[in-house]
């Protein structure tokens, strides 16, 4: 999704904007631009299609110098990626960058055209700068003009606004799309996400919906949309800039895959005591009484986080014996779901900003459900709107394809399920200690699973030219087949489908031939024999099979074309280990096909529009 950066202070603004935009590249974009009020008062707006290096070339030698500016990476919603549609947009002296969707832009555009405004782009954003310009021409200062303009808008936005004629003020506002403000020493920042400003400050303010921040050279103020002051706390961000860098790896995705032992250790850290069998999930905020009173759990999420939720259903139902429904967030809100005060609504989101998940959460809250979120980004909107939180503590995930976010979500779900199971009397002391021992051992097993990297590269080189893949799994590992297929398709652009292995005979089997490799998850568990039968069905039709099996399973090697082994562990944790070779397989295939692994086409890291 679009990325916004803004700065007001004493430093040269251009390098700050470009550096900030680079750190937001992971969000996905197709064009970029900056606007700077130069020291001589002149406003410069430069935009270009494609990657930031094109913008940098366009800026070279232009002598842009100033200490107030805004920058933007655009992910097209209204209008194709082009220079005219790229942000910032300008009307008179007003310049705007925007993330979100203005739903009533056609009505506003028609009205503004009648009043004589000339539009130069196909975007919804351009109406914002014409509106601000119009109110500013009526004698309002920038702050008031923005406030009046925002009242005319329906839809979602995070915006940054400057005015050539008021070089001492930068305005940010949000309604539905994320925006943070960075508080530096005599300088201020706005950004769509924290990594954009981490090099400059760790002190941030998370704006809430319908809030506006007015940043001046020496002071700032936050108001609501009626201009009433709002008190907000300054949060210290513990992530450091190095955590959001590649650290010698070729891609963020590869770095994040290899970070998983550490990330999972951080999910567990401080939350369990093996000696006493205690689990500490203080931020989850549900009392034992409330947990005992629950009648059902509803897990709602999108994409990879939804796959974590599907796996969570198996874990919670077995360990807690509570019914669990799992929904795709964009479907949940439109199906009139049955939610009440005895329902635990569990939102899962890496970013904490996914618009569909947030909308579903609000819907559930309105209906009286208790809302807990499993989230990675501290202070994100979803966490702020939840009653309780289980942070995954995976650290910043920059690659668009979720890897460590996923396995830490699974770890958090396991912790939550074990805790609920104890509180509801389904797990006794002995079993609890066994489960916790397995969990503590997990990071070491992941280290082992990562050792197959070279072998997987070899398998990838044998398969990277195929056009279609099928992924099969059963039981708790079926969602992992979905996740494996999603990983492959989103970064290598190969068509891949995940299926419950037992369902193959009801349709997908028609696709099987020598051109359709099948990745089968065959961990040694209660459905192992069943999966073997599915393997034979594929083989009988000439299909090529890559199996991911449990260490020591020699027999499987005789039945399939390639086999990768994962360490044996408790069946609740097997999905985490199975994910590792699937992530590496997708990664190596994508690299061999020359894809942009960290920023795959058309995708955004955090989808902040519906
Ligand atoms: C994962 O690889 C995807 N990029 C995507 O499906 C993602 O999981 C989804 O958009 C949900 O994001 P969230 O976890 O930040 O809510």
Image: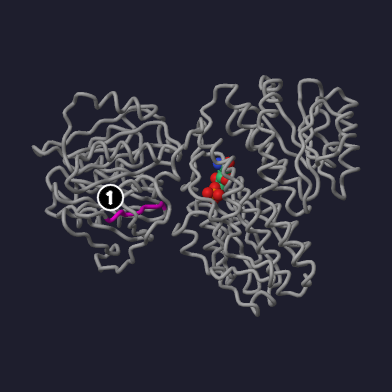
Give the percent coordinates (x, y) of residue 150.
30, 54
Q: Is residue 194 left or right of residue 334?
A: left
Extreme bottom residue here?
A: 289
Name above or below for residue 276 compared with residue 439: below
- Indicate the quadrant of ligand 1 in the picture: top right
The answer to whether mark 1 is within 8 Å of ligand 1 is no
Looking at the image, which residue is at 56% across and 35% down? Answer: 254
As drawn, the residue found furthest toward the front would be 275
Q: Which residue is depicted at the point 75% across and 66% down? A: 433
Outermost residue to the left: 40
Residue 439's place in the image compared with 609, above or below, is below
Nearer to us in this view, 150 or 318: 318
Left or right: residue 191 versus residue 9 is right
Membership of 284 in magenta stretch: no
**Res 294 → quadrant:** bottom right
Identity of the residue drawn at 57% across and 25% down = 591
Q: Is residue 179 magenta?
A: yes
Looking at the rendering, the stretch of residues picked out in magenta corresponds to 177-183
Q: Position of residue 289 (x, y in %)?
A: 65, 80
Quadrant of residue 344 in the image? bottom right
Could you tell me which quadrant the N terminus lies in?
Answer: top left
Q: Residues within 10 Å of mark 1 (few under 14, many from 20)?
A: many
Query: Picture coordinates of residue 568 (x, y %)?
Result: 79, 47
> Residue at label 1?
189
Q: Residue at x 39, y 56 (%)?
A: 237
Query: Relative to 46, is 248 on the left or the right?
Result: right
Image position, residue 230 (x, y; %): 29, 68
Q: How many marks?
A: 1
In front: 219, or 273? 273
Q: Secondary structure at mark 1?
A: strand
């Amino acid at each position: 999704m679009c990325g916004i950066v803004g700065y007001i202070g004493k430093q040269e603004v251009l390098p700050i904007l470009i550096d900030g935009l680079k750190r937001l590249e992971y969000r996905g974009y197709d064009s970029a631009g900056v606007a700077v009020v130069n020291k001589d008062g002149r406003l410069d707006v430069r935009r270009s299609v494609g990657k930031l290096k094109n913008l940098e070339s366009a800026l070279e030698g232009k002598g842009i110098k100033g200490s107030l500016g805004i920058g933007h990476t655009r992910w097209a919603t209204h209008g194709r990626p082009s220079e005219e549609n790229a942000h910032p947009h300008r009307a008179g002296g007003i310049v705007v960058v925007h993330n979100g969707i203005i739903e009533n832009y056609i009505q506003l555009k028609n009205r503004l055209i009648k009043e004589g405004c000339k539009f130069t782009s196909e975007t919804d954003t351009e109406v914002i700068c014409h509106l601000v310009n119009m109110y500013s021409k009526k004698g309002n200062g920038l702050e008031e003009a923005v406030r009046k303009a925002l009242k005319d808008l329906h839809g979602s936005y995070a915006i940054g606004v400057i005015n050539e004629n008021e070089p001492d003020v930068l305005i940010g506002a949000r309604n539905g799309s994320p925006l943070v403000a960075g508080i530096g020493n005599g300088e201020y920042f706005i950004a769509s996400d924290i990594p954009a400003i981490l090099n400059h400050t760790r002190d941030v303010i998370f704006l809430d919906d319908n809030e506006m921040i007015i940043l001046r050279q020496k002071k700032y103020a936050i108001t609501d949309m009626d201009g009433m002051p709002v008190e907000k706390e300054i949060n210290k961000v513990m992530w450091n800039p190095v955590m959001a860098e590649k650290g010698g790896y070729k891609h963020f995705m590869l770095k994040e895959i290899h970070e998983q032992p550490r990330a999972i250790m951080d999910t567990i850290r401080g939350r369990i005591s093996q000696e006493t069998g205690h689990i500490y999930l203080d931020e989850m905020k549900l009392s034992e009484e409330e947990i005992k009173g629950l009648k059902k759990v509803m897990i709602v999420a999108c994409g990879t986080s939804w796959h974590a939720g599907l796996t969570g259903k198996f874990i919670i139902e077995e360990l807690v014996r509570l019914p669990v429904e799992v929904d795709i967030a964009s479907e949940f809100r439109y199906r009139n779901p049955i939610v009440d005060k005895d329902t635990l609504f569990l939102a899962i989101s890496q970013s904490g900003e996914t618009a569909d998940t947030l909308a579903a959460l609000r819907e559930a809250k309105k209906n009286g459900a208790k809302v807990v979120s499993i989230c990675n980004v501290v202070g994100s909107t979803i966490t702020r709107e939840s009653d309780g939180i289980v942070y995954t503590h995976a650290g910043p995930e920059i690659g668009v394809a979720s890897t460590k976010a996923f396995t830490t979500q699974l770890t958090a779900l396991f912790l939550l399920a074990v805790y609920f199971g104890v509180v509801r009397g389904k797990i006794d002391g002995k079993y609890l200690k066994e489960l916790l021992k397995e969990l503590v051992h997990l990071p070491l097993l992941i280290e082992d699973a990562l050792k197959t990297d070279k072998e997987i590269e070899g398998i990838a080189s044998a398969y990277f030219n195929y056009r279609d893949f099928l992924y099969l799994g059963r039981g708790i590992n079926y969602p992992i087949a979905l996740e494996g297929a999603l990983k492959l398709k989103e970064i290598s652009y190969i068509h891949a489908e995940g299926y419950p292995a037992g369902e193959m005979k009801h349709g997908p089997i028609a696709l099987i031939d020598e051109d359709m490799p099948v990745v089968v998850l065959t961990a040694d568990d209660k459905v192992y024999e069943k999966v073997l039968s599915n393997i034979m069905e594929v083989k009988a039709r000439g299909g090529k099979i890559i199996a991911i099996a449990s260490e020591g399973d020699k027999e499987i090697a005789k039945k399939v074309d390639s086999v990768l082994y994962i360490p044996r562990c408790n069946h609740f944790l097997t999905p985490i280990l199975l994910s590792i070779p699937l992530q590496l397989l997708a990664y190596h295939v994508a690299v061999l096909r020359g894809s942009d692994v960290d920023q795959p086409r058309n995708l955004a890291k955090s989808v902040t529009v519906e």
